Image (spheres, coloured by chain):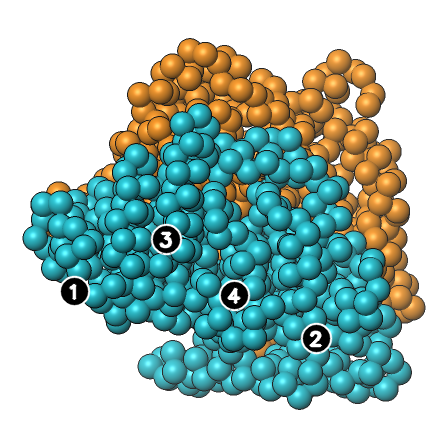
Chain colours: A orange, B cyan
Amino acid sequence: MIANITESSLYRIINPRSIAFFGASNRFTSMGTNQLNSLKALGFEGNIYPIHPKEKRVLDLEAYQHVQDLPEVPDLAVMVLPTQVVPGVMEECGRKGIRHAIVVSGGFKEVGGSGVVLEKQLLAVAERYGIRFLGPNCLGVANPHHKFNMTFLPFEGRPGFIGLASQSGSLITQMFGYLRRFGLGFSAGISVGNEAQVDIVECMQYLAACPNTRVIGLYVETIRRGRAFIETARAIVPHKPIIAYYAGGSEAGRRAGFSHTGALAGPDALYDGVFRQSGVIRAHSLTELFDFCSALGSCPEPGGNRVIIQTHSGGPGAAAADACSRSGIELPALSAPTREKLAPLVPHTGSVSNPVDLTFAKNPLDYFETIPDILLGDSGTDGLIVYFLAPLQSIRRTMQAMGIAEEQLPELTEKLFTDQARALSKLIEKHQKPLVGFTFQGYNELFVRTLLDHGIVVLPAPQRAARAMAALVRYRQLREKIRSKAVE
Amino acid sequence: MIANITESSLYRIINPRSIAFFGASNRFTSMGTNQLNSLKALGFEGNIYPIHPKEKRVLDLEAYQHVQDLPEVPDLAVMVLPTQVVPGVMEECGRKGIRHAIVVSGGFKEVGGSGVVLEKQLLAVAERYGIRFLGPNCLGVANPHHKFNMTFLPFEGRPGFIGLASQSGSLITQMFGYLRRFGLGFSAGISVGNEAQVDIVECMQYLAACPNTRVIGLYVETIRRGRAFIETARAIVPHKPIIAYYAGGSEAGRRAGFSHTGALAGPDALYDGVFRQSGVIRAHSLTELFDFCSALGSCPEPGGNRVIIQTHSGGPGAAAADACSRSGIELPALSAPTREKLAPLVPHTGSVSNPVDLTFAKNPLDYFETIPDILLGDSGTDGLIVYFLAPLQSIRRTMQAMGIAEEQLPELTEKLFTDQARALSKLIEKHQKPLVGFTFQGYNELFVRTLLDHGIVVLPAPQRAARAMAALVRYRQLREKIRSKAVE
């Protein structure tokens, strides 16, 4: 394992200071142009040198006819070129002294036949010059902390803590908006494509050392180096969680993966075993992959699997309880002191069992401070799942009925939500126990946005909250097992 | 079974012409006030009579001190009152001649002890006067087609086709926004609470006859009349699909249900058997309940389980393929004629196996018309799953690069999306096969909204699309089994 990120051979692929860009023009129907545009749009701070046979300027940057003409040796070459010319261009880059590349072009091993031969040629050229390269057939890298995004779509949102190594490029570039909505972001997203040379194992090593990465996510269609994968993961997991989604588990998934990145996937049970042995948490859908990343990157570690559900609505509470049970989470009865503390706050129609169902709460503000404080303070609980609902219209109506002027409502609502989110966030800090929320409200609504902005995990369904909580519990177990050198 | 909705004893509970409203005041911190406000906000067209001991007017409506004072006999009494007084008020309503009621008040059977006794009293009074009532401990009814919503939250969105009978009131009132985002809505949402008298079986009969209801959803914590449930469902399923989510399957879910509505739930396997025997499709989460309702209420019936996946991104395609396999959906190879037709439209980096992966499509517009037309036309396919992505920023940039003026962009983008959605919608009509889409884009984005507005099912993850497609296949199977009188 590397101790410092700069020791990684991927360092200059993910943090380049200067880039030679092949395959962009001024036509926006071309993929390369869109990628160069994304790079510019995020405000990349180093030099960018478009290489173009005819154009003098490409997207307002000075263009060069040949890589040999460049005034410096760039850290990185990006190639979005017709398949056939890629090995030749790699050769020219090698001669110029470039030692890192990202090959976006497809048409290699994944299409079979002559593509397989071309990929071998490409690899041979790169190795002759000591070039490390991502791809081919990848969408490259998004490292928003470095203002570096050369994927197809412009970056949205904020830099975050999820380090994703993906055998699907779309799951980097097409997830920007998705992650932004959930208050998340990439520390680095790396699309590995066909893994002709750099593979996810090397990416995991990089992400393990990356200070911006709190949690490592993997989208897997195949693991090409099983032994290295297991050893690397086991070295990382005691320090950082790894979550993997495996798409090749079924016959159809396997076939889809093969035509996508030439991946030869194995049976589901085999991969399940590999993940288990590696200490990697398995997500069973893409949604779960990011849900688990969110919880594991945001929440304190639970001491065990005993969780309380806080709700004011029976149905969502019962659904959460059922999902917890199915995910291996225990819902203990509340301790006598906790029940006593709750009694004055809960109306007679409510319930102080678990779920704690407040029904129509006596004081709605208790929901965000007094009550979670009591529940998290119960020594018999390891975490809290909370149902969130704050109907803006009703809240404003109540404020109006209290005599507050119309024009003050927006400011006061915002203050109310901010106070509530801050209170919850402080409670998590104070008790050092995980809190996972869920809601049926929209992710563009002020209330949900405010909670997310305060680092509170809010998922859009009770089942997803329960499973994310279970992933937190699972990580603790896996880590302990690896630490104690026991093999599961 | 009833042939006409007006024969249902629930008809005037769900379609009242006039209402006596107990428990609303001018204080917006009270539940009753909020409920009356919701009723007014949707523009209920009949007479509303607030009953209040002191106020002369309640929310700008003339208030009455006693129900006896009312100038007519209203169709319905709504009670949001302290538990103790409910049986007495029911008695007064009976004397006035009112024959339908909704009892929102909680504190009955679900809290045990004296609550159980009070519920028996309430039932006895109602039966003495021949009153049919919903509840107690319910949130009542939302029938947007009748501009009738007396639940806690104001109605949002449009009247729709989902008839939901729910043992959780929140799942009616707190789902308005959720359904609106997915382009859905209730035909009628009925919260049954403790089911002292009216139960979900009676609601199913109503919804089966309701012309606005295309699909029946159930949120179940317990089934109190097993035999009646099975017989009623089996009579309905040949004509209308029923989808149920059962929250009491685990020990924790069971306990939560009990403290919620006094439900005595049974083991998971028992309910699984009941649903199977009834021809009811089981949803395994609340999310699935509404996903399945969406697909079954919107899509033509598939002829079988052979589905094609259309994508331009390998990862989302592989994830959908894997999820299909796990849901019992077959992904057949494309026929030779289909492959021939596709060949000129797919670049060499793409794949004409299943998933059909177009990668960077030659002509993006083919994605919404020519290609799905070919795929749905393949005689070996019963349905299509489509991955949707339309990044607004990139589309506008391409338009600009084509020389289109800035000020024309919004209109042209809207037209583009509308044309695409209309084309897809016509293809579904033409081929009479289901199309289920999925996307990672947000549900407030123009592209997704336009698809939904054209009745196209779009779910937020490949797994959810696969499982919704599987529910369509399952319904066909269940219906055929019941029609052939075979018991599974």
For residue A230, above or below residue A417: above
Label located before the other in sequence (2 or 4)? 4
Density class for disc 3 (Cα within 10 Å; few <14, some 14-19, many ≥20) is: some
Q: Are marks 2 and 4 in contact (CB under 8 Å)?
A: no
Q: Are marks 3 and 1 in contact (CB under 8 Å)?
A: no
How far apart marks 4 and 3 lie (CA) works out to 22 Å
* Residue behind mark 1: B71
Q: Nearer the viewer, residue A117 or A225?
A: A225
Label located before the other in sequence (4 or 3)? 3
Q: Please state which of the two labelled residues, at mark 2 or mark 4, is closer to the viewer.
A: 4
Residue for point 54% across, 84% down: B422
Q: Of the residues shown, which amino acid type is indicated by label 2?
A: Glu
How far apart marks 3 and 1 lie (CA) works out to 20 Å
Position in image of residue A140 (x %, y %): 64, 55
- Whether residue A321 is visible, yes or no, is yes
* Residue behind mark 2: B301
Q: Of the residues shown, which amino acid type is indicated by label 3?
A: Tyr
* Residue behind mark 4: B206
Residue B354, quarter of the rendered image: bottom right
Position in image of residue B424 (x %, y %): 60, 81
SS for callout 1: loop
Density class for disc 4 (Cα within 10 Å; few <14, some 14-19, many ≥20) is: many
Label located before the other in sequence (3 or 1)? 1
Label located before the other in sequence (1 or 2)? 1
Residue for point 70% across, 18% down: A480
SS for callout 4: helix
Q: Nearer the viewer, residue B388 or A49?
A: B388
Q: Nearer the viewer, residue B105 or A455?
A: B105
Q: Please state which of the two labelled residues, at mark 2 or mark 3, is closer to the viewer.
A: 3
How far apart marks 2 and 3 lie (CA) works out to 46 Å
Q: Please state which of the two labelled residues, at mark 1 or mark 4, is closer to the viewer.
A: 1
